[in-house]
Image (cartoon, rainbow, N blue to C red):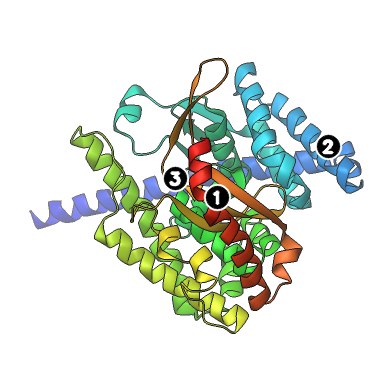
Amino acid sequence: MKKNNEKNKTIAKRTLSGILSLTLLISLISNIKYYVERAAVENSVSFSNELELDENERVKNIRELFERSLYKNKKLSEEEKKIIITSFEENFLNHYAKYLDYDSIVDLCVSAQTVDIKLMSDFARKWGWWSGSFNPYSNRYSIADYDGELVSHENLHAILKRGLMSTGLNTLVWGYGLNEGATSLFNNDFAYVEESIVINNLALIIGFEEMLDCYLNGNTFELVNKMCKYTSLTNALKLITLTDINVFSGYYDTFSQKFKEESYEEDYSEQFLNRFSIIRDIVSEMYENKFGKKITDDNLGKYITNSDGFTLGKNNFEFFYTFWFNQDGQINLTAVGTELIETIDENGNENIEIPSKNYVYSIEELQNLNFEDWIDMARNDLNKLEKNGEKILKNF
Ligand SMILES: [Zn+2]
């Protein structure tokens, strides 16, 4: 018996190490393949010439490089290519291509040439707790349907693929929440609202271009470094972990509600509120260290870290106010309605809209302001927004 057992153990060990080496080999092969494709893109003669142009020309050229690379992709249908081009250029490239550096542009082209799309199965659509996902290992994204915003969101993950396990700020699981928040913010979708609020606040603290730089180069450690100027390492890591937990428990809640076949309703649990009160405290500390003044609900905190902004739907209020980066390199001071309003356009079509009203500032304007000026400006515009709050709702 013992002997047999040992023999079995040896076989098991051999099988296991066989499987492990095979997996390693397969992953190495796909990784090598990726780097070969990367080198091919880099060595194409026109590539580097086309990037040495002034900013306007550069954005145009990046779009053309992207389209040309996409048309070389043999895995995608012509319709899929068209959807990717239209949605990705509209949502992301037109606004942020100018921030892509040489390495990111090479990655953009390699991704366009090699990425694959798969429609989710009916089973996954019924039981899945997300509408799309990108797998860096297989270099493929799966989507529930060809919705432009969704395609563009997943494609943004795809162009930021790093190695076999990572994309953007996400390494394996770590940074998953912040990565989704940044992807939503820079793709201008509202797929991950709370996580976008966190990213938006971090960008207001560390700087917009710094945040973009960390995101586009997948540099989570650099982001932690920048956060540590305003908070402790423990708090920086805690904020990242809590944001991760928020996304995963959100997936779980959706899944379990679907499982019970109850209609899905967003519900803010006590754990959610606790998580966000810790995140809010860390963010408030960071603002305080940035401005040298305590951020409270009586001053700037009302607009950037107040409980309403962080825990949407907690109270029965009609608007919450927030400073929000928009896609044109500006910051909006926005009053956002918390209820969706149904409208009917002139053709009789029904639409669902989120009532909102903006004041727009340039990033430089806001980043160069001191605390008092920022509050003054916000108070002035906020008073106007608050007075108009009722009116905005009625106009919708
Ligand atoms: Zn995503």
Q: Which is nearer the eye, 172 or 288?
A: 288
Q: Is 345 located above or below residue 383 in the figure?
A: above
Where in the figure is residue 15, as x and y percent of width and height?
A: 32, 46
Where in the figure is residue 153, as x and y percent of width and height?
A: 56, 39
Q: Which residue is mark 2?
A: 60
Tell me the SS state at disc 1: helix
Residue at 26 percent of width and 56 percent of height? 269
- Tell whether 10 sits left or right of 229: left
Q: Which residue is mark 3?
A: 23
Q: What's the residue type where badge 1 is placed?
A: Asn
Say whether disc 2 or disc 3 marks the residue closer to the N-terminus: 3
Residue 235 got which mark?
A: none
Q: Which is nearer the eye, 347 or 163?
A: 347
Q: Which residue is mark 1?
A: 388
Say whether disc 1 or disc 3 marks the residue closer to the N-terminus: 3
Q: Is 161 located above or below residue 282 in the figure?
A: above
Q: What's the residue type where badge 2 is placed?
A: Lys
Q: Is 79 located above or below residue 206 in the figure?
A: above
